[in-house]
Image (cartoon, helix red, strand yellow):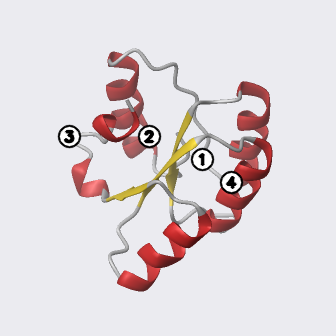
Amino acid sequence: MIDDEPDVTEVLSRALAGEGWEVRGAADGASALAEATAFRPHAVVLDWMLPDIDALQVLHLLRRELKTVCVLFLTARDAVEDRIAGITAGLGVATSPGLASTPPIPHIS
């Protein structure tokens, strides 16, 4: 779970843990890459807007290490161009933080 907003991270982490996922968190791209390299997750929830590294760059670097990891972008961006950029970069699914009360578990189960 990579998001710089603690409330979002907490809600989604609890929901995923409740479904049986082991959840690790990071608040920025650099920490996320280090954690992912050590933990080797099957799925990653990635906030589009991180404080240090562009999320598309994080996705690119994740894919270099973890070629088959499922990545779900969490974004408030709804422009077609942003979604196309994500899909082109290897994005699986994009969802909005407005869905935090109904987390994206079906997409990554």
Residue type at mark 1 is Ala
Say which residue label 1 marks: 27
Assign a secondary structure to mark 2.
helix
Assign a secondary structure to mark 4.
helix
Residue 36's image quarter?
Answer: top right
Callout 2 touching callout 3 (CB < 8 Å): no
- Distance from Cα at disc 2 to Cα at disc 4: 14 Å
Identity of the residue drawn at 32% across and 27% down: 15
Say which residue label 3 marks: 102
Sequence-first disc among 1 and 3: 1
Query: Residue 75 location, x and y as percent?
Result: 40, 63
In this view, the residue farthest toward the left is 101
Residue type at mark 2 is Thr
The one of 3 and 75 positioned closer to us in this rendering:
75
The one of 99 and 107 positioned closer to us in this rendering:
107
Sequence-first disc among 2 and 4: 2
Query: Residue 68 location, x and y as percent?
Result: 64, 41
* Mark identifier at residue 71: none
Disc 4 packing (10 Å; few <14; some 14–19; many ≥20): many
- Distance from Cα at disc 1 to Cα at disc 4: 7 Å
Say which residue label 4 marks: 29
Assign a secondary structure to mark 3.
loop
Sequence-first disc among 2 and 3: 2
Disc 1 packing (10 Å; few <14; some 14–19; many ≥20): some
Q: Is residue 54 left or right of residue 65?
A: left
